[in-house]
Image (cartoon, rainbow, N blue to C red):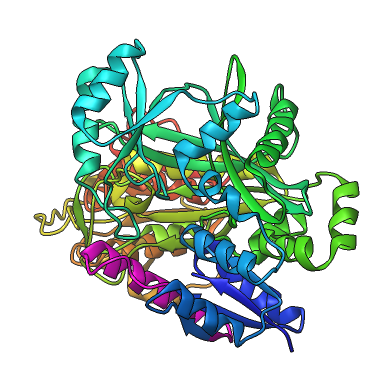
Amino acid sequence: MRNIIIVQCMSTGKNYVQDITNRKCNPIVLELKAKNDSKEAMEYQKQIREGYESMGDFDLIYEQDTYEETLEMVKQYDPLLIIPGTEEGVILATKLSNDLNLPGNPIENLDAMTLKNEMQKRLAENNLRYIKGKTVSTIDEAIDFYEREGLNEVVIKPVYSAASVGVRICLNKDEMIKAVEEVLKQRGCYGNEFDEVLIQERIDGMEYVVNTVSCDGVHRITTIWKYHKAKTEEGGVIYDYDEIIADLGLGESQLVEYAFDVADAIGIKYGPVHGEYMVDENGPVLIEVNCRPMGGSFDSEFLDRISAQHETDSSLDSYLNPEKFHKKLNEGYKLFSYGVIKSLIVPKDLIAESSPIKYISSKLKSFYKISLHDYGDYQPFLKTQDLESSAGDIYLVHEDPNQVKKDVDYIRTLEKQAFQLVLSEGLNKNKLIRNDNDDLRLLLENIKSYESILLVTDEEIDELDILQVAPDKLDEIKGQFDYIIININKSIINKKDDYVAELFLNIFNKIRTGGYTFILKNTYDYLPNGRLGAEALVKIFDLKIQIPKHNLKKIVIASNV
């Protein structure tokens, strides 16, 4: 059995392990040494190792103290291929492949493959559109370039980094100076220090990802994504959601042609390229390339549902199965489902008592999975400033694009109007309980007595001649009802909000088609985000919020129509 070595395996690159096994080869992961003993480097190494648990069976080896020692160690395994499993693995994988005469990308192209300033230089040398910029290590150098070039809006970014860490959009000179100062004091996600930063003119347009695989210098598209990002008050760039491009729109075929030209200019011969591009009125321009599988921790199954292929398997074809590579190339770009990755944006620093979004998102029709950066109750979350500080991602896929877009809109509404249903701080706890049933009696006077009615209540009300049930006995109630009235507070006041969300969605399951639910003020005051939270919960079940009745105020009314 031949060995294939994956250098630093994480994120989407983890799919290589099973793909290699499926080809009757032996996967070997080569783990890199930590950059240093900084907190960031140790945390990154911890993430790497935690990811091994979900990767299946593989052999693990470690980078040695010197490159020469690592090379001699790798020779002993007589590898068929050496490939990078993440951005940090590109340099070593390329060096080893060249020294062992294995298929890969030429060593002379390594700087253009990994350094953001060198990528742009290579484009300029090949008469392709590029972004004007300069590498600086001091504030004075940054100011000199800014003023000399007559710049206004600029982007500050590390020369070597990933996941948008250290990237800042600056609208004026003062913001630029502040950003340079901040980034030069930061460390990257690998724990590396930023000794210099790249200052570039800002290109304002739509941002895309074009993922390709290459076989002996021939390039093939695997997927095209459009990024939707936002800028924080501090100037940080954050991801909102990424959507797959199924049918090319205006200007997007030109983008693909330009991506092929970029791959040629960089000198790509084999394997995957994750290219990020901006498209404005002047056409496409490269932001950066990453010569490894796309990040985002995509499951192979998720990608297979979208395009009947996934990037790591297609990458192995480019090295090992040229015939299949060219067959896929001739088939063209075909998708079978629509996919979106929604990043969860945290509006402020907080400590989450619970995570209702884990249960709520699972009820979305296009739900595939949620990857939340929480490790238990009372988890601290920082305000989202970049990809690394998002709360996590929700993966959505469905044959109907409209369903996916509807689910994205729902999540974005929760973020903006009912965030306690995403990450709950327990703000609605310890309120004074009110036991006023006047609203309930008025409501019952307006409901036809011969309809089936279920009252979910903390305490049974003797004078009411309707079916009543306590929340913890709900499972004993069979069938569905024309009207469900929710009048609870004691049973939820000290419960975590993920429990509360699950309870309400179970209640809504008992509404008959054409039926109604009524959530009294006596109840929604104790829900996360109050009335807005109640309305958000009914929306997850596609219930329609009804126009309030003049004589029935302070009641959320929703129908199953």
Q: Residue at x 19, y 53 (%)?
A: 350
Is residue 482 shown in magenta? no
Residue 239 visible in the snapshot: yes
Query: Which residue is nearer to you in this view: 504 or 391?
Result: 391
- For the N terminus, the image quarter is bottom right
Q: Position of residue 465 (x, y in %)?
A: 37, 62
Q: Residue at x 51, y 47 (%)?
A: 111
Left or right: 335 with respect to 189?
right
Q: Residue at x 37, y 70 (%)?
A: 47
- For the C terminus, the image quarter is top right
Query: Which residue is nearer to you in this view: 356 or 299?
Result: 299
Q: Residue at x 65, y 72 (%)?
A: 100
Q: Which residues are magenta?
A: 32-59
Q: Which quarter of the picture shows residue 376?
A: bottom left
Q: Which quarter of the picture shows residue 507?
A: bottom left
Q: Position of residue 4 (x, y in %)?
A: 66, 77
Left or right: 147 with respect to 78?
left
Q: Position of residue 255 (x, y in %)?
A: 68, 30
Query: Which residue is nearer to you in this view: 550 or 118?
Result: 118
Q: Which quarter of the picture shows residue 144?
A: top left
* Residue 109 vertical position relative to residue 232 in the rendered view, above or below: below
Is residue 42 shown in magenta? yes
Q: Position of residue 156 (x, y in %)?
A: 33, 32
Residue 544 visible in the snapshot: no
